[in-house]
Image (spheres, grey):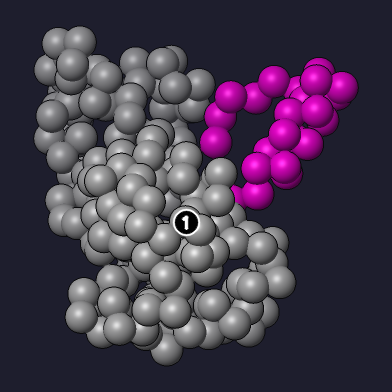
Amino acid sequence: MAKSSISNSVIRRLPRYYRFLKDLENNGYVRISSRELSEKMGLTASQIRQDFNCFGGFGQQGYGYKVSDLKEGIKKILGLDRLNPIILIGAGNLGCAIAAHIDFRSKGFELIGIFDADESKHGQEIGGLTIQDAAGIEKFCSENKPSAAVLCIPKTAAEKTVDRLINCGIKAFWNFTHYDLFMDHEGIAVENVHLGDSLTTLSYRINSGVNDRRI
């Protein structure tokens, strides 16, 4: 199946599969059936088989899945066997927390630069990197060729910043702003993270009694 035809819902389940399989391997599992995996993940066995078949399938009839092989296969599909250089724009509270506490390397990225327009933050260190002046983004990108950016800036600053970054060759964004990149730009990869929306969804689940752990 062509990658372009794989549904977004399947793609979003892959990191969860990978996380569960790592835990299974760490706990000594050598093989597992789709039924056993479905029980642990709250999915149906049919859904799991359909998801894996999107990528050619991994199991053997009557044997199930070899945990280590399946984990490595999904790791490769997710691109976690290589590191993509990424920069972070906006060293406020959220940006600093992301730079200090997210394990970028385990997620397929290497954080190589942090930028902020606030002069008072220039020279400070976070996670082993020095916060640089946002005015130097173009020069840094020209020299270091990052392929992605984390956006932790106000919506009012996002549009011009994104234009600059795209002109610098950035093709992917982990977007914590409320600026809709898809409205003005085509051909870029975007993961929008709206923390407030997630909390509002939790409010809905509490008040409606919905408790579905599947994704």
Q: Residue at x 59, y 82 (%)?
A: 160
x, y (%) of residue 112?
Answer: 26, 60
Q: Answer above or below: position of 191 versus 103.
A: below
Q: Residue at x 53, y 77 (%)?
A: 162
Dividing the picture into quarters, in which one does residue 147 lie?
bottom left
Q: Which residues are magenta?
A: 192-215
**Farthest front residue in view:** 120
- Which quarter shows the C terminus? top right
Q: Which residue is identified by label 1?
A: 121
Dividing the picture into quarters, in which one does residue 110 lie?
bottom left
x, y (%) of residue 206?
Answer: 80, 20
Q: Amino acid at mark 1?
A: Lys
x, y (%) of residue 145?
Answer: 24, 77
**Is residue 203 a member of the stretch shown in magenta?**
yes
Viewer-closest of 40 and 135: 135
Viewer-closest of 51 and 197: 197
Q: Residue at x 33, y 30 (%)?
A: 19
**Farthest bottom residue in view:** 167
Disc 1 packing (10 Å; few <14; some 14–19; many ≥20): some
x, y (%) of residue 122?
Answer: 41, 61
Secondary structure under tag 1 reads: helix
Q: Answer above or below: position of 94 versus 83.
A: above
149 horizontally vs 130: left or right: right
Q: Answer above or below: position of 51 versus 137.
A: above
126 horizontally vs 134: left or right: left
- Which quarter shows the N terminus? bottom left
